[in-house]
Amino acid sequence: MNNTAPLPKPPPVMIEEIGSFHVGGRMCKLERLPLRERVSTAGGPVHHIDPNGEIMAGQMYVQYTRLAVPKALGPLLMWHGGGMTGAAWETTPDGRPGWQMFFLRAGFDTYVSDAVERGRASFAPCPQIYPEPPYFRTAKELWEDTFRFGPSGSWHPDPALRRIYPGLRFPIVAFEAFLAGSVPRWGCNDALTQAAYDALLRRLNPGVIILTHSQGGNFGLTAALNAPHRVRAVISLEPSGAPAPAHADAGLLRDIPHLFVWGDNWRDNAFWVRSRPACERWRDALAAAGCDVTCIDLPGRGIHGNSHALMADDNSDDTAALVLDWMAARGLVRH
Amino acid sequence: MNNTAPLPKPPPVMIEEIGSFHVGGRMCKLERLPLRERVSTAGGPVHHIDPNGEIMAGQMYVQYTRLAVPKALGPLLMWHGGGMTGAAWETTPDGRPGWQMFFLRAGFDTYVSDAVERGRASFAPCPQIYPEPPYFRTAKELWEDTFRFGPSGSWHPDPALRRIYPGLRFPIVAFEAFLAGSVPRWGCNDALTQAAYDALLRRLNPGVIILTHSQGGNFGLTAALNAPHRVRAVISLEPSGAPAPAHADAGLLRDIPHLFVWGDNWRDNAFWVRSRPACERWRDALAAAGCDVTCIDLPGRGIHGNSHALMADDNSDDTAALVLDWMAARGLVRH
């Protein structure tokens, strides 16, 4: 065998349609703002702009890719994390096919969203509609806090002086490419976002499978709780929050299998030490209610070094395969 | 023949890969901002946030869909207009397949971008990086000025009291769905945006075909001028601006065919009466330089009622077919 031969191309994917829609949103009125002027194109004329009037706010963007012959029992809804967009499911930062392509090849129609306030969903003016200004994700926050590439104090503007966790699986040469996918986030839009996700479930046929990452986790777990008859399964990659058993009835989800997947290096990370217990409480409540709950703790299986960006790490396809096997074992997709 | 029978499904499209990347952008540093606190998920703990540090700004998002067997000589780069994102090329607001699907079926790889400052490209903080705040598109501006659904004074918050141009081809029942696709725009990012488009052309193999709408027009015409050896053709749907013949050498584009397409009802519209002459001057300069220039004036061909949203109007497939025929006649795609 010639080790330098290129890998054979995988077979093409037969697509019925690619498209998109917005869901949710309502007309809002802006008033008493001063008139402005705008040059709309380089060298163009000055246009007088009246910023007052009706605008749309609160909508969410959903892009679907429908297969000619799906093999799964329902579409896979892919809900990104905080400060990210649906692009997180596409190509990995180092250029490998992402989870969207993986699950299309596995036979799932995919519905990838940009949640309220970001990406193609748009955002609304502050302070007129959103009460506070956005947060722009710093490289340091991404590196040390949220995504756990290295411990506290390990970020440095000079790439040569940055430190990472031993055996980190995130492809660190592609850090800038990953950072380029960050978008601003607000702290005031949880209710609007949940409403838009709930509206998405009402718009689609019952039987969807929800796959979430990070901030998307709480929205996905709650959306299933709000419409259990519409959801076949919920898969949460490192959720940053979950419903509280004291305020939500896990018994409503008794017939909906749940999967949680966790990476490495969270025990010395203040953000995750504070965030993860709520997810464990909900997992335990689901299990106590008789729900089919699985927790894949990657380090516990001897898979070390995964960051919070499981779908971008260098073993992203292996982790996707674990998720696919879990679904296949529950009859959610034909092999 | 049974007139109520559903249309047969078109054959599936054979896709090699769907993916995306960001191009352009640079690290910027935020300093001297006050510390903040954030609750990152409903019911979650309070996190202390330091907004100071390095962030990424100026990047552009590009989503590609590559066919297993393309029939075109180069990929089709689809560049949206102002206050829009790449979603403008997807499904029409009334739910029909959009131009992206049309040109995939016609054999083109598509590269759909979200330009700097919007959608999945993200935006940067104001006033630290962008000097001015964004413009949020009002329904009235969209209706009366930019998209020409009705004359001045025809917008009304009550749908029953809105007026449209006689024979308008935009599917007006889907107005709210179209408005939901609007995103904020800034007036300060022309140079950043042009730089990102130019960087995209350097990243792709030579031989691309550029298709633009509105604000994208000037960027596309200028990108061709900045890298004529990389571009096979430029198609401009209602460009809102163009290079000035006094400052740019149209002769550089002698070998690159150009197509301009215009809709209806622009003569009594102040925005377009002021914006369009610059495009006509550049078209004339191209023609004078010996360039193969075509102008499809739809009303001049007896096709009346098209709005500025040619790719959303109810004859969007017919207009796309005119563009495809123009490309086929120049050998840019095999029939």
Image: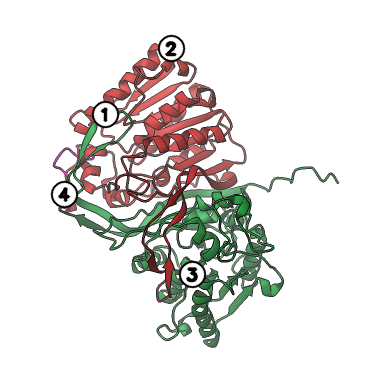
Chain colours: A red, B green
- Rounded to the nearest angstrom, the CA distance separating label 1 from label 3 is 47 Å
Which of the two labelled residues, at mark 2 and mark 1, occupies the earlier sequence position?
Answer: 1
The residue tagged with tag 4: helix, strand or loop?
A: loop
Q: Which residue is mark 3?
A: B217
Amino acid found under the numbered disc labelled 1: Ser
Look at the image and give the residue range highlighted in magenta. Answer: A148-157
Neighbours of disc 3 within 10 Å: few (<14), some (14-19), many (20+)? many
Q: Which mark is residue A275?
A: 1
- Rounded to the nearest angstrom, the CA distance separating label 1 from label 4 is 25 Å
Neighbours of disc 2 within 10 Å: few (<14), some (14-19), many (20+)? some
Question: Which residue is nearer to you in this view: B127 or A276?
Answer: B127
Q: Which mark is residue A156?
A: 4
The residue sitting at 34% across, 58% down in the picture is B59
Residue A132, relative to residue B279: is it above or below? above
Residue B298: say if magenta.
no
Q: Which mark is residue A290?
A: 2
The residue tagged with tag 2: helix, strand or loop?
A: loop
Q: Is residue B334 left or right of residue A264?
A: right
For mark 1, name the chain. A
Amino acid found under the numbered disc labelled 4: His
- Rounded to the nearest angstrom, the CA distance separating label 2 from label 1 is 24 Å
